[in-house]
Every structure is written in structure tokens, then in C-alpha cells.
Amino acid sequence: MSRSILLVEDNSDDEALTLRALRKNNILNEVAVVRDGAEAIRHLFPDDRADVTPPGLILLDLKLPKVDGLEVLRRIRADEQTRFIPVVVLTSSKEQEDILGSYHGGANAYVRKPVKFADFSDAVSTLGMFWLLLNEPPPDSNWPSFEG
Amino acid sequence: MSGRYQSNEPGTGEPQAATSPGQASTLPGDRPDCVRQGTVPDVRLPGQHGGVTVGRRPLEDSEADGGMPRLALLSAIVNSSDDAIIGKTVDGVITSWNPAAERMYGYPAEEVAGQPVTVLCPPDRVGEIREILDTIRRGERVVHRETVRRRKDGTAFPVSVTVSPIYDEGGQLIGASSIARDITEQQQARAAAALRRRADDLERANRNLETFTYSVAHDLRTPLRALAGYSAVLAEDYGDALGEDGRGYAERIQAASSQMSALIDDLLRLSRVSRAEMHLQTVDLGAEVTRIAAELQRDDPDRRVRFAIQRPVQARADRALIRCVLEDLAGNAWKFTSGRDDALIEFGTTAAEDADVCCFVRDNGAGFDPAYAGKLFQPFQRLHTTREFPGTGIGLATVRQIVQRHGGRAWAEGAVGEGATFYFTLKAGEIA
């Protein structure tokens, strides 16, 4: 079963262009789209968690309505079930605080969305290829905790 | 506080008569003569009208407080005060004067005796003295009024004054006591606090502006991506239907989006260099220019450009910020010499009257009309079209901003077709 992508993106244009870039680059994994931070948290941590298969990759925008991306990231890293999911911060910002904050929060990568579409398309395709195909994911269930 | 006492330490066991020299004195012409040898003022605070009542008792009744005569004790208290304590008649004639008053105002007791209190007041505040005396005559006090008084040498200083009416045993108003405290230090502290508040406000305003810049820049990029993205999609998916002209327009939308994206990036950079924390150290600017020259050549290997770089050029600067300046200036020189086969870019120093180090970056490129030299450093001002030379017009504004943050200045000289020279000044670095 191929792993799914969770795209956390509030802008519908960025959403459409990202989905197109994935499709055009033959990354045909299932993509779930959530449009604000609160929805992202509900999606990842529903009341009945038995049904949920965690995504194989999370593409996370930082500037989001309701709950911002860094808080979503914090929740992801604080939970046993989601702590090892690769999270790529995909944002407009190149501010040092955002970059540092993302790495402090445990982001696996930080990519600034290029304005030029060819570059944007390349970036999305590269991320999909690397994290879903090339990168070896953590074992599926009951990831052991190495703390303590 | 006690360090400022110069005389008359109380409790040294030496009884001090009210009339001894340099002490709180009963002055000739006192009216009424409430302090007199052989009697002791019985001072109660507050009096029946919120003032001071002075009574008389035999001396022997008042031996209290370790056997010290009451008069001497009260006198010692007044003498040791750091506040100027002055007695005056209801008409404002000075009748007593403690050592602190002498220190504060600069008049010795004998000189000021019998003088009107208005001598202690700047001419423009004489009306205030009248007003205070009116208050006293009504039997009311003036409490902690902040005003200005004048020393013997004419200098003014801020004081806090409390003036109370003095009554005799019969309840008759016989004068006033005035206690003045020099509040120069408090005022300075208050001014410093106000200044700190202003600085805090300014910093807050700056932070708000930064947040605003950041947010605008971030939010502007998002629709730009849509413009660039959809026009690319149009050309890709509907290229045949668009035809050659249509594809050309789609390309123009993409080019314009890229240009605006560059503008936003440069604006953000300008905002960043304006607020970046500075770490000053001695930097060899010549070495930095050498590195930058190598990078320029690497990124554009087909160009043939000769560099003449003076080394070392030591200056005191923030390395990252001054590197931005040198990158912008060298990058400009590189760009504006693109039409020349014999391109030459020089970096060196020259003499300047107002600075330790005056650097220049000179090229033999397109140059500019000196009539517009002043405009060059303003954001968005360009003297060339983007077709001739690409750019956003923010680089030199960034240069000036950084140089000014280093306490220097930046300016340019040039002529059309004869190249340009950009100067900036810095403080000297330590000689290695």
C-alpha cells in the first residue's frame, strides 16, 4: 500500500498547483488536503484513532488560519503515533525565525515555495520522490520510544 | 544621603545653641521674635490649622532626649536636615536659614537675613511667591509643590517646596516655614525614565513595522505564485490553442511575476539589514572583495573582467552586513560593465576628512548622469530600464542603510559612458 500525503495548505492556488505538480511528476499517492491548522490536528488526531493510518509525508505551510504550522508541528512531534512522520515545511517565508523555529520543532526539511512555476514544480516533485520513494520510513506500528 | 552632610552632626553630645554661627539662627529683625534665649519653642505638628504652633516654656522643663536641651535638639534636627528649612514672615521676609539652605542657595545666613524670599526665585516666578504667601495668610499649606528656585550665582534648579503657616500660642499667624528639597536628581531620573519609555515605544513601533513588512512580503508572494503558476500551466496545457502571441503573453506574466518576486526579496533584505544585530570587528574589506570577485566570475564564466583590489583594507564593521555592501557594489560594477570588453573594477581607499576609512568601488561601465546621483540611493529609483540592466533599485538603498548603521556615509560619482565610483566611509579597524 502506497503511503499517503497530507497537504496542510490554506491557499487554494497553492493547493491546486501543488496537486498538479505531484500528478505531472507521476507521484500518484493519495493526497489529503486540510486547509487550516485546527483541521490538520483533527485529521491527524481524530476521536477514534483506531481507523487512522498516519500519512507517509506531511507538507506543512506555516502561516495558517486558526492554529499555525509550528503548533501543528509541535502536536505531531509530541504524539507517539505521529512523532516520526516526515514533515516538510513548505512556505513563502525565508525569515530566519521561521526556519529556526521549524527545525527546533523537529521539521525534517524546510523548503521555500519558489515563485517561478518550473522551480515550484521541481521542488514538489523532488520532495515527493525523496520522502516517499527514496527515504526509508520508520517501521509501521508501535514505534518504540527511545526516551528514558 | 548622610555623605552630603558637611557639618552639625546631631547626637555628638555637643549641645548646640540656636545662635551659634553657621547654624539655624534667629536673625536680627525677626518678627515676631519667637525663639529667644531662655525660652524654648514648643513645636507641635500639625497645628490646629495644619500649620505649626510655637509656644514658650521654661528651659528646665524641656530637658528630654538624653538630657539634651530641647532647643538644642530641635536646632540640631533643623541643622542636620538635607532640605533647606527657611523661616519667613507672612510678608515673605527671611527670618531663619539652616545650613542646607546655605548649601542649596549659596547665600550665607547673614547675607540673606531680612531679604525678601523673592531673591531665591527666578524673576519670572515672583508671582508664585505672592500666591504662596496668600495661601499662608488664608491658613493653608502648600505641599510638595514642584517649582524652580535660583541660587546666588543665578543658576536655576528644580525644587519641591512645602510651606506651612506658623502660629503663636494664641493662634495668631506669625510667619511661615518653608522646606525645600533639591529634586534635580529625581527630575533627571524621571527624564531618563521618560526617555527609556520613548525608546521602548520606538522599538515597539519598529517591531510592528517589521511584522508588517514581513506579513506584506509573505502575503504578496502567494498571489504571485498563482500568477506565475497558472500562466505556466496555460502555456503548457493550452500552448497550441494560445498560439505564438498567446504563449508570449503567458511568458510575460511569468517574467513580471519573477521581477516582483525579486523586488519583494530585496525589500525584505533591506528590512533585514535595518534591524539585524551588529557585531563589530576588524574586517579586511580587500579580502572580502577578492572573494566576491571570484564568485562573480564563477557565476558568469564567459565575462572577462579585470579586478584591481587594494589589500588589506582594515575597517571596523559587521562582517555579514559589510559583505552585503561590497556584494551590491561589486555586483553593480559587474552588471554595468557588461557592455565592455576591457571591463575594469577597482576597489581601494582614498582620503576623506570626516572618516577614518573611505573606500571606493570604481568601474568603467555605463555610468550615470550625475544630475541624478542623489536619487541613486533611494529605494526603487533606477537610472536604467530593466531591459538595459536588470535590477530592482533597492540594492543601493540597502548599501546606504548599512553604511549609515556603521556611522558612515555613502555617495556616488559618475558620468554617462564614463563609469561610476561609489564611496563609503567607515571607522578604522585595529591594525593587524
Image (cartoon, coloured by chain):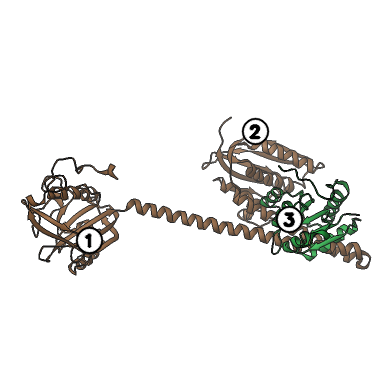
Q: Are marks 1 and 2 in contact (CB under 8 Å)?
A: no
Q: Quadrant of the N terminus of chain B?
A: top left
Q: Dot 2 falls on which chain?
A: B
Residue picked out by circle 1: B163
* Chain B color in figure: brown
Q: Colour of chain A?
A: green
Camera-nearest residue between B250 and B335: B250
Along the line of sight, the residue nearer the viewer: B182 or B326: B182
Q: Quick check: B269 left or right of B355?
A: right
- Residue B311, labelled with which disc? 2
- Residue in front for this viewpoint, A143 or B392: A143
Extreme residue in the top direction: B432
Q: In the rendering, at what x and y percent does residue B308 appear?
A: 69, 36
Residue, disc 3: B262
The secondary element bearing badge 2 is classed as loop
Amino acid type, callout 1: Val
Residue B214 sits in which quadrant? Answer: bottom right
Quadrant of the rendered image containing residue B262: bottom right
Specify the subunit that label 3 lies on. Answer: B
- Could you tell which of marks 2 and 3 lies nearer the N-terminus? 3
B246 or B168, which lies in front?
Answer: B168
Q: Crowdedness of circle 3 by 10 Å Cα count: few (<14), some, many (20+)?
A: some
Residue B86 coordinates in the image, percent (x, y): 19, 55
Measured as percent of width and height from the top left, residue B91 is found at 15, 64
Residue A31 seen by the camera: yes
Q: Choose mark 1 or mark 2, whichever is in front.
A: 1
Left or right: residue B62 versus residue B8 is left
Measure the alpha-carbon separation of dots 2 and 3: 33 Å
Residue at disc 1, secondary structure = strand
Q: Is residue A66 above or below residue B341?
A: below
